[in-house]
Image (spheres, helix red, strand yellow):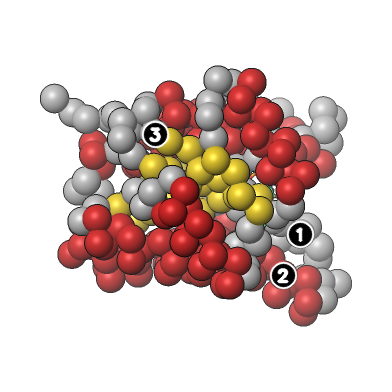
Amino acid sequence: MVNFSLEGKIALVTGASYGIGFALASAFAEAGATIVFNDINQELVDKGLAAYQEAGIKAHGYVCDVTNEDQVNALAAQVEKEVGVVDILVNNAGIIKRIPAIEMTAAEFRQVIDIDLNGPFIVSKAFAPGMIKKGHGKIINICSMMSELGRETVSAYAAAKGGLKMLTKNFASEWGEFNIQCNGLGPGYIETPQTAPIRVPGHPFNEFIIAKTPAARWGKTEDLQGPAVFLASDASNFVNGHILYVDGGILAYIGKQPK
Ligand code: NAP
Ligand code: GCO
């Protein structure tokens, strides 16, 4: 019997007060996992706790900046003490800056790299020892179309998400012998606050993405839930170092011929 259950597992999803992280954590809860999440400030954590409670999920929320190693190490100790050793880690927290490369400052570039690439390294490094001790673990890094493709104005984000793809393969290589599987989940263009500015009806990018997607629609966070549960469950115990793209076919498609 293929085992998609997460019963008895503890899942940490970073930056999961809302958006993709919230949707993935909700699906994990439905599959039986205990949910732990962090966000950048108490206001967001409280917002997240209320949203989980409304969904009937008893989540454990913590304030933690994924770029701050002291905060992340303290989070690992606090979660182990208050909830238990994390079995499933989703490195979801992330930002994007849409600025032409020539106009982007080095500080802006570094900020995106810090959150989207250094953060997953810092958090994985803090939680992997517990997984090794436990004899199993799942790490899921939230990659992107920009792990494979470039586009104007997202140089820092593409560099970070391309690096995250390779960090995923490296963790898979380094920790596979400890029965830790590290994979990537690569969403296409999804309806969340992060894409709201480029999803406005009539915005050229909105029409572009619909033409570039065989499914002819933006993705919804619900589209990511099943693939994430698969990667978090025993059903994927021999899948390692893989980036599972959930993009409606964008990466397979040259794009619709203009009328
Ligand atoms: P989102 O709506 O902006 O949510 C990101 C979350 O991460 C927010 O709660 C954010 O808090 C939090 N965060 C930011 N910096 C943080 C830090 N230093 N420490 C802790 N938490 C932090 O983004 P989303 O659309 O749900 O995307 C989630 C992930 O999926 C990101 O990694 C994104 O790159 C990736 N992704 C998104 C899409 C898409 O189309 N939406 C597609 C592919 C991949 P704040 O509210 O303070 O920013
Ligand atoms: C952008 C979008 C994308 C999505 C996602 C695609 O400006 O191009 O924000 O980067 O967020 O990463 O997979």
Against 199, residue 148 (above or below) is: below
| Mark 2 surroundings within 10 Å by alpha-carbon count, few (fewer than 14), some (14 through 19), many (20 or more) | some
Write the residue at 73% across / 43% down.
44
Choose the circle earlier in sequence order: 3 or 1. Answer: 3
Q: Which residue is mark 3?
A: 33
Against 57, residue 169 (above or below) is: below
Write the residue at 55% across / 20% down.
56
Amino acid type of disc 2? Gln
Callout 2: SS: helix
106 with respect to 88 (left or right): right
Question: Total marks drawn?
Answer: 3
Callout 1: SS: loop
Relative image position of residue 168 (x, y in whole percent): 40, 62
Q: Which residue is mark 1?
A: 97
Quote the CA–CA distance across marks 3 and 1.
Answer: 33 Å
Does the CB distance between marks 3 and 2 fall below 8 Å? no
Pick the quarter of the image with the N terminus: top left
Write the residue at 25% across / 49% down.
239
Pick the quarter of the image with the C terminus: top right
Does the CB distance between marks 1 and 2 fall below 8 Å? yes
Residue 85 disc label: none
Q: Residue furthest left?
A: 1
